[in-house]
Structure formats: C-alpha cells, structure tokens
Amino acid sequence: MNNDKVKVKCINTGEEKDVEVGTPLTALIDIFGVKLPYLIANAKINNKTESLAYRVYRPKTIEFVDLSNSSAMRTYVRSLCFILAKAVDDLLPNAEMYIEHAVSKGYYFQIESDVPVGKQELDAIRNRMREIVEADIPFVQVEEETMKVVQLFRERGMEDKARLLETSDMLYARYSKLDEYIDYFYGCLTPSTGYIKIFDVQPHNGGFLLRVPNREYPVELEPEVKQEKLLNVYREHLKFLKISRLDNVGDLNQAKLEGRMSEVIQVAEAYQSKQIGEIAEEITRRFQEGVRVVLISGPSSSGKTTFRKRLEIQLLVNLLTPVGISLDDYFVDRDKTPLDENGEKDYESLYALDLDLFEKHMLQLMQGEEVELPFYNFVTGKREYKKNFLKMTDNSILIVEGIHGLNPELTAHIPQDKIFKVYVSALTTISLDDHNWIPASDNRLIRRIVRDYRYRGYSAEQTISRWDSVRHGEEKWIFPFQENADVMFNSAMIYELAAIRRHAEPVLMQVPRTVPEYSEAYRLLKFLSYFNYITDRELPPTSLLREFLGGSSFRY
C-alpha cells in the first residue's frame, strides 16, 4: 500500500478501500457511495462516535449513522442548540439563556434579558438562526490547556462553563467556535451549520420551546405534545436547585471541594422525603373521598419499587393499611404473549397482561370480597396460585405497581373516583452547564447498568444492547399516558451521578472496544467524568438510590 494511502472499511457498504491519508469523513460518504434514508450526522469510528469532520490517518472501520439513530440525533440537537445560543448572543448580547430540559417533544429554554423577549424578539432569533444555517458556518474545534479555556470562558462571562471545566479532571479541554462565538458541548457536532435545516422556536408556558426533528420520521418536526404536569415538576426542581445554590455540575463539584457534600446529600434526601410525605397526605385525603387504589407507573429504573415502599410507610403513619400488588403477576402465560412488529414476544405490551383477570380482582377486592392472587413464574413462563388470599379491610388501600398503571385501558371499567395515579421517573437531576442538560434517559440507563450488573448478572454490554428496545416500549406504552397522573414524583437526586460514578465506571470499562455497544459505553464514561467522586456511605439505608447501589434496608 502507498504510504500516502490508508485502508478504510465501511460497514454500511461492506467495502474496503485505500484512501488518501487525512481524508475527512464527509468525503468518505461519497467515496463509498453511502446512501441512508435520512441526514447523516456522525459516524462510528472503531465503535466510537466521531464528528463527520474527523480525518482518517490510520486504518479504520467506519459506520455512518443518520437521524434515525439516537447518537446522530444527539449530534443534530447539540448543533442546533449551539446555533440558538449564537443567535441569542448576536441579538441580545447581555442576555443569559438556559436550555433546561426535554419537554413536549422539544427542549424548554428561557432567556433572561434587560429587554423583554416577546414575539418580535423571538421572530428575530428564529430568523437569525436561519441566517446562520444558510451561511453554512463551520463548527471549529479548539483544544487548549484546561485552565486557558477556563480563563477564556470566564472572560466572556460564561461562569457555568468555567466552573465545570476547572472542577473537572482534565489537563486539556476542547471548546467550539462559530465565527467568534464560543461554547462548550461534551459530544460531537455536525461539520457546519448548514446541516441543521429542520427546527423552530416558539413560546411555551412562560418560556420557549426549541422544536427538533421527529425521531421516527426526521424530515419533519416533532408534533408538540402538552406536558404541563411534567413542566411543573421541572420548575419545582429548578427552584430547589437555585435555593440550594446548585444550578450546574460545576456548583456540585465546588460543594464537594468545600466539604459541603454531606449537607447536599441530607438536603436532597429530606426533599424527597417531604415530597413522598405530601403525596401520602393527598392520598389519605382522597381516601376519605372514596379512593381505594393507588396505581404507580413509570419507565425502567425510575425507582418505583423503593418509592412504593416509602409511600407505604407514610400511609401507615397516616393510619391506612397499604396492600401491594404487582402487575407482573398478571402476565399471560408466555406462549400467549403478543408479538411486536418484528415478530418477537412483546413483554412491554399492555396485552401481555391478563386485563380481564386484573379488572375482575380489583372490583372484587373493592367490594370486600376475598381474592386468591396469582403468582407469575418467570422461569416457567406460567401463572401459578400459591394460596395467597387477600381481603381488604375498612382502612385498606391497594398499591399497584407496574409500567401500565396510567394506561386508561387497564382500569377502563373501574370507577375512576376510586383510583389515584402516580407517575414516577428520574426526570431531572442537575445540568452540566447552562446549555447542556442531563437527559433523563441517561440517568436511568446508568442506574440500570449498575443494578443489572449487581443483582441480575448482566454486563453493561448486555444492558446497553437492550436499551433501544426498552426505550421503544416506553415511548409506546408509558410516556403517552404520563399526563394522566394525579401527581408526578421526580426520583432523581442532585448528587446521585457523583455517587453512582464509582459504581458505574468499572462496569462500563468492561465493554469491549470490538462491539457496537462500546460507543455508548464510551459516551457515558465521558459524561460521568465531569462529576467529582463522592462516597455513598452517607446515604441513608432508605435512600431511593440504594435500590441500585445496594445497602438498602428494604427487601426487593
């Protein structure tokens, strides 16, 4: 092979070619003739996600990914947020913009400015974003010593980014430029602004919504979905963060350096206890009005089980007798499980449950009758009966836990005034900085990786490989019904990723570089590296995080 050439293998086409040393990935798309249904936004290089601006200097295996892939969508959204930040800075140079969390199929942001931001200003921001896209400005990556980058951000009044980087364990740091505007993102961007064609900004519940491409069909915008209850939970949590002086990860790291982490843990745990107590008070009040069933729902690794156990304690304090039932025991026999669109057994489906039997038992119990509860044997895949009889007393209240608890079809024939619904999820913890939020799905995935390894014998590779399927089931069977809840409980804690880091890293490091799951493991390791280690020895044995880390006083 010529010294000026390097061998590259393209997974998409199955071809190997010798190409010029230093060829960018953008050129390799044409060289290999890669055709994908949607916009190609990044690529996996030896199972590690890289920008399309990446150049090959040594033999590589490359897989290009389009917007149907979650990694590519993250790159697109990250680049779009950069464009939004520059547009705001161009038009309102003294303003502060905060991109806070995902809601209503988009991203909620706020702008604090001397000039009130109304329709005229928002229209100007949208138009400026389009001008930036049309100009096709390259995103330029710059790497320097971390303290020089910290100084640069501090000089520009970007204290959130300066503090994040100066409290991280990095000798060198990268930042990105659009013309003379600089920002910081922990993942890759598109090569230039011209890639970002589909977006919008609009007013939304006292702030603004950044709209993004549809995940299933990314040539059009996601439809806006009303999620007012979810937004209220976010707002309440943000108030708590501000009062705690912990707006971002840099603040959390600083608290650790100042020896305040014990106080942070105690306050966070007390805050959750207060919320659970308030939910128990509301259920008790509604019990006086006739409520007899509490349905607890939420996606994977939300801490539903610990929440249920702590709620039951609070209800006992309120002189009610909670009786727990798991929806899992109402699975149909495995050979009757419905199939998904790929012909695989769909255990996430509502119809994997015996709805008729569940409804019958709920009605009988509420009428004071005795019922023999089923037990589902996950080894044999069969329903069994073990003489587990249940009869409610005058002060009994049923606590039913399962992912379908908020689906109206589950309780279609049960009087709705007898039901109280709770949605539990790790909704938000703390942002990396003002423009980098922490996705709830990342929080839950890290929890699940640790729990699966500790209690179920699954490797991080196995857990990551199943995650897309889990997320697909959540999008279909859980998230559409979350606004049906009477109350929402945010199970995430501001300190938890700092505590879980030492448990997650050794498991993630075991993922081989040779498997596709390595790219996700590498991303999560990079993401966790921003958190300073803290010990979890100060976590109380009733902490919700103990469900994943171990040491809980509850039995699971």
Image (cartoon, rainbow, N blue to C red):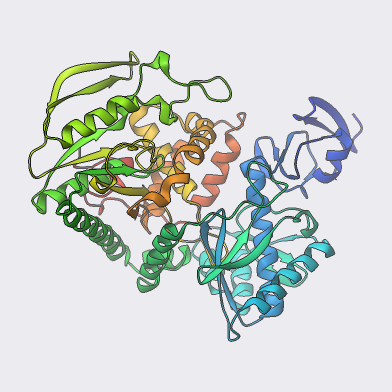
Compared with 127, 28 (above or below) is: above
For the residue pair 418 and 27, the one nearer the viewer reads as: 418
Quadrant occupied by the N terminus: top right
Q: Position of residue 29 (x, y in %)?
A: 83, 39
> What residue do we see at 52% from left, 45% from top?
524
Left/right of residue 427 with respect to residue 186 in the rendered view? left
Q: Position of residue 463 (x, y in %)?
A: 47, 32
Quadrant occupied by the C terminus: top left
For the residue pair 546 and 406, the one nearer the viewer reads as: 406
Number of marks in the rendered image:
0
Left/right of residue 324 with respect to residue 427 in the rendered view? left
> What residue do we see at 27% from left, 64% from top?
267
Question: Could you say which quadrant of the image residue 209 lies in?
Answer: bottom right
Answer yes or no: is residue 501 visible.
no
> What residue do we see at 65% from left, 35% from top?
47
Answer yes or no: is residue 489 visible.
yes
Question: Could you say which quadrant of the image residue 210 lies in?
Answer: bottom right
Q: Position of residue 500 (x, y in %)?
A: 38, 47
